[in-house]
Image (tube, helix red, strand yellow):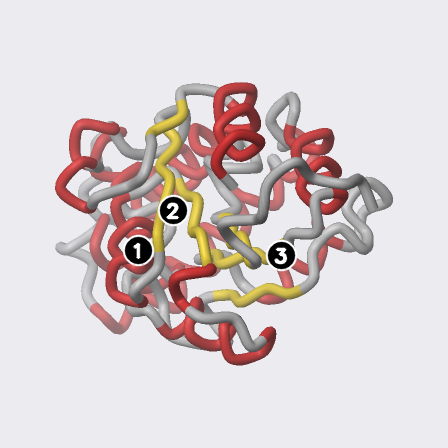
Amino acid sequence: MRPTSRPRRFDLIAFDWDGTLFDSTQIIVRCIQAAVKDVGGTVPTDKAASYVIGMALMQALAHAAPDVPPEKYPELGNRYRFHYLQHQDDLSLFEGVLPMLADLRDAGHLLTVATGKSRRGLDDVLHSKDLKGVFDGSRTADQTAGKPHPLMLQELMAEFDVLPERVLMIGDTTHDLQMALNAGCASVGVSYGAHEPDAFHVLQPLAVAHSVRELHDWLRANG
């Protein structure tokens, strides 16, 4: 383990996935729009579709398509999954993510994921060669409460016996930052994902990073 020149401020760092580590925001927006169109709903704007990223899937789709009746939700979910699978090979980690995660592991941080993705969807990417063994734990929206409910973070804190003041949540949406606030944890926002950073400040993030490089530098200095 690389020696550090200062004590760690945070023992556990929880990352959102889509739009924070994974460059998927625009594809998710297009898939939401296509799914809503397929079931006859009013196609949401880019802004409306990007707002729901980070929520549990069906909660997100229902919010993005308020005129689609509940009996069509299963079909809506299936159509979203269909379109997303067509683009799965187009998705990739943001440049600089792997070196940042390696640096954090070397510094002794526990690394976790707290995401609105499904367990199956997250496991598919975490089992890839580059990411195998990188994360110590994770929670998904279909195995616990969706954001901004604090249960994801509360379960991770309980699993690793870490107090809220020693936990940092990093995400690209107000849902991520509100979840951290609800759990009594600190947060950092990133502006390169789904939500406009103007809405972040009321949720009291310690910082807003405008690139992975900037996030990495902040974590080195303050994590």
Q: Amino acid at mark 2?
A: Ala
Q: Name which quarter of the figure residue 73 lies in.
A: bottom left
Q: Earlier in the sequence, mark 2 or mark 1?
A: 2
- Which of the labelled discs sits on residue 122, or is there none? 3
Q: Residue at x 63, y 32 (%)?
A: 91
CA–CA distance between discs 3 and 1?
17 Å
Give the mark toward the camera: 3 or 1: 3
Three-letter amino acid code at the position of disc 1:
Ala
Which sits in the foreground, 19 or 168? 168
Q: CA distance from mark 2 to mark 1?
A: 12 Å
Q: Position of residue 212 (x, y in %)?
A: 54, 24
User: Which of labels 2 and 1 is toward the front?
Assistant: 1
| Disc 3 residue crowd, few under 14, some 14–19, many 20+, Cα 10 Å | some
Q: Nearer the viewer, residue 14 or 86?
A: 14
Q: Quadrant of residue 200?
A: top left
Q: State how far apart marks 2 and 3 are (Cα).
A: 21 Å
The residue depicted at 77 percent of the width and 41 percent of the height is: 3
The disc label shown at residue 35, or none: 2
Q: Residue at x 20, y 58 (%)?
A: 68
Residue 60 numbered mark, or none: 1
Q: Residues within 10 Å of mark 2 (few under 14, many from 20)?
A: many
